[in-house]
Image: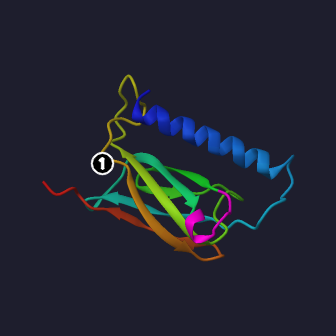
Amino acid sequence: MTFQNRWVWIGMLGALGLAASAGCGGTDGPARYPVSGSVSFDGQPVPAGEVFLEPDGSQGNTGPASLAVIENGRYDTATNQGVVGGPYLVRISGYDGVSIPDSSAGMPLFPPYETQVEFPAEQTTQDFDIPAASP
């Protein structure tokens, strides 16, 4: 299984979990707040990729996870699919956007990038600038 395929499966499983937890069209569950922003690598917008927002259970956050697609250096969580606030682990995958046989997103620009963010319990903007790897 390729790296991107693994992330696709993780995203699909996360989406299924989110759908199951949402119920049949209801808004049961905790209030979720939209998150949007930019993603750059070495100062340049990331053409394609994903931002996966996972509650940091080690810090007591048990809220739902969220997945946002990066398009032309920007991402935005879907309505009612954002964060509950609190500590989150953020995993970012970025691609060059040039379609190849195994990936419509193209070649990876960098290894999966991970960071931690404390999100407020309100709509917010969070930008990510992934530094170039040192030679």
Name of the residue lying farthest toward the top:
101
Nearest to the observer: residue 99 or residue 22: 22
Q: Residues within 10 Å of mark 1 (few under 14, many from 20)?
A: some
- Residue 118, compared with residue 6, is above or below; it is below
Q: Residue at x 25, y 59 (%)?
A: 42
Q: Residue at x 64, y 61 (%)?
A: 82
Is 101 on the left-hand or right-hand side of 26?
Answer: left
Locate residue 63, reporting x and y percent: 68, 63
Please tell me in which quadrant of the rendered image residue 61 appears. bottom right
In what quadrant of the picture does the N terminus appear?
top left
Q: Residue at x 62, y 56 (%)?
A: 65
Amino acid at the residue labelled 1: Phe
Q: Determine which residue is flagged by label 1.
A: 110
Q: Which residues are magenta?
A: 57-64
Locate residue 129, reporting x and y percent: 34, 64
Locate residue 19, reporting x and y percent: 75, 45
Task: Say if the magenta span includes residue 72.
Answer: no
Q: Secondary structure at mark 1?
A: loop
